[in-house]
Amino acid sequence: MIITIDGPIATGKSSIAKKLARAIGFIYFDTGAMYRSMTWGLLKHNINPDDVEAVKAYLEKFDFDIKIRQGDRYYYVEGENITDAIRGEKVTSAVSKISAMKEVREKLMALQREFSIGVNAVFEGRDMGTVVFPDAEVKIFLTGRPEVRAKRRYDELKAKYPEDFKEMTMEKMLEDLNRRDTEDSTREIAPLRQAPDALVIDTSDLTVEEIIQKIQEFKDTRRTRLKEAT
Ligand code: DC
């Protein structure tokens, strides 16, 4: 079974997907981390995203790996552990543009579908329920008030990367979040959209546990309905 969780920035997608997967014994995939890893690789090699031929050549040899240790995921590109680096300022400000490229999306979509073969998994991202897994049995779309999401992201980044984000203010965070949301939802290919058959949850005033409970209830009703239909 595939469960997809999509939604804009800082709606709690990662924490929810991770906890949900653990609770029901599924594997968890953070597809944003894959776009970030690809971005890190392109930046490392100083490849200009406007140079489509150079990007294509890099995609051919994209050397990406995920290692799981004690339930935590570590991301590797060309053998280097980049788990922390992909959350930093450089990658964060470049990833929207790179994830809008058709060639990049095709490559990562193929990789994501490959990862899904023969496993029960929760895939978290922006286009999981609409483009990558349109036949997923359970689709979730998380939303949240921009102010609440900006505050969440602000607290998280300041705590984890104080040096990288020392100039960051709440106003700038909100502006940044709105800009990235707009970029993600207005891009031509695989924009951030809610699938028509997705359960929509506004996470602004709910705890992670309450959200997981809603998803589990929805999963159970979907399963019953799918059984009845066969
Ligand atoms: O979820 P995140 O902030 O780590 O995602 C990083 C970027 O990748 C964000 O700009 C949206 C993009 N992304 C995407 O286009 N498609 C996905 N399935 C996942 C992320």
Image: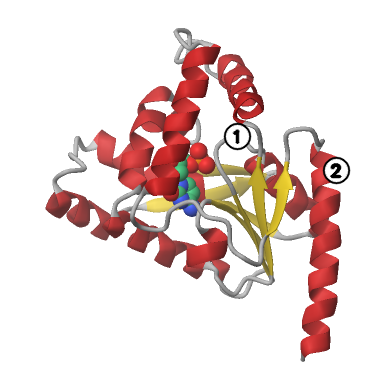
Q: In the rendered image, which residue does mark 1 sit on?
A: 10
Q: In the rendered image, which residue does mark 2 sit on?
A: 210
Kindly tell me whether residue 61 is visible in this rendering. no
Q: Nearer the viewer, residue 88 or 76?
A: 88
Q: Report the disc number at residue 44.
A: none
Residue 215 percent across, percent down from the top left: 79, 55
Residue 70 percent across, percent down from the top left: 70, 43
Disc 1 element: loop
Q: Residues within 10 Å of mark 1 (few under 14, many from 20)?
A: many
* Residue depicted at 48% across the width and 30% down the height: 178
* Residue depicted at 19% across the width and 35% down the height: 46
* Residue depicted at 43% across the width and 53% down the height: 191
Q: Residues within 10 Å of mark 2 (few under 14, many from 20)?
A: few
Q: Is residue 76 left or right of residue 45?
A: right
Disc 2 element: helix
Q: Is mark 1 within 8 Å of ligand 1?
A: no
Q: Quadrant of residue 154?
A: top right
Q: Nearer the viewer, residue 39 or 187?
A: 187
Figure quadrant of the N terminus: bottom right
Which residue is the extreme one toward the top?
Answer: 167
Which colouring convention does the figure follow?
secondary structure
Residue 152 percent across, percent down from the top left: 65, 25
- Label 2 sits on what residue type? Glu
Q: Quadrant of residue 81?
A: top left
Mark 2 or mark 1, which is nearer the start of the sequence? 1
Q: Is residue 117 left or right of residue 201?
A: left
Q: Is residue 182 left or right of residue 61?
A: right
- Label 1 sits on what residue type? Ala
